[in-house]
Amino acid sequence: RKVQIGVRRRPERCGDRSRRGDVLTLHYTGTLEDGTPFDSSLSRDQPFVFSLGTGQVIKGWDQGLLEMCEGEKRKLVIPPELGYGDRGAPPKIPGGAVLIFEVELLKIERRPEL
């Protein structure tokens, strides 16, 4: 199964699109299918920063955040095998949970090619 991606908002101008190895700065809110929130960068008032496609985050993010523009908002529906699987992430995420993320990409930092 794949990540379902819904584009909520895409800016009129899109320069770079996110790709593997980019460092992304974003805000997100994660909920379970029934709407129960389990995590949000907004409540901490601190964006989340990570390197895309390097295994720092769940597979659903590494797949679902590719080809994104700065300023774009997406809704990701992530099946358990691309999230936390059968084990979940206790206590907030039960095993086998489908995860729903609302994500806004704030910044793309491209590392120079080696």
Image (cartoon, rainbow, N blue to C red):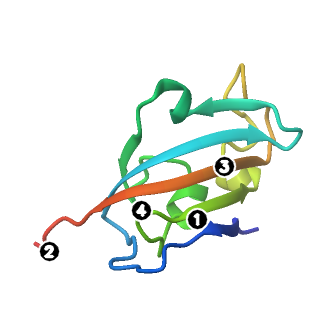
Q: Which amino acid type is marked by label 2?
A: Glu
Q: Nearer the viewer, residue 23 or 105?
A: 105
Residue at 41% in and 32% down: 46
Number of other residues with Cα within 10 Å of mark 2, as a class: few under 14, some 14 to 19, many 20 or more: few
Q: Nearer the viewer, residue 75 or 64?
A: 75
Number of other residues with Cα within 10 Å of mark 1, as a class: few under 14, some 14 to 19, many 20 or more: some
Question: Is 77 drawn above or below residue 26 in the view shown?
Answer: below
Q: Of label 2 and label 1, which has the lower sequence position?
A: 1
Q: Of label 3 and label 2, which has the lower sequence position?
A: 3
**Distance between the Cα atoms at labels 2 and 1?**
23 Å
What residue is pinned by disc 1? Answer: 64
SS class, disc 3:
strand
Q: Of label 3 and label 1, which has the lower sequence position?
A: 1
Q: Classify residue 30 as left or right of residue 79.
A: left
Q: Are marks 3 and 1 in contact (CB under 8 Å)?
A: yes
Q: Residue furthest top?
A: 91
Q: Residue furthest front?
A: 12
**Distance between the Cα atoms at labels 3 and 4?**
17 Å
SS class, disc 2:
loop
Q: Residue furthest right?
A: 34
What residue is pinned by disc 4? Answer: 53
What residue is pinned by disc 3? Answer: 101
Residue 65 on image: x %, y %:
52, 64
Q: Of label 2 and label 4, which has the lower sequence position?
A: 4
Q: Which amino acid type is marked by label 3?
A: Phe
What residue is pinned by disc 2? Answer: 113
Residue 90 on image: x %, y %:
70, 23
Q: Which amino acid type is marked by label 1?
A: Gly
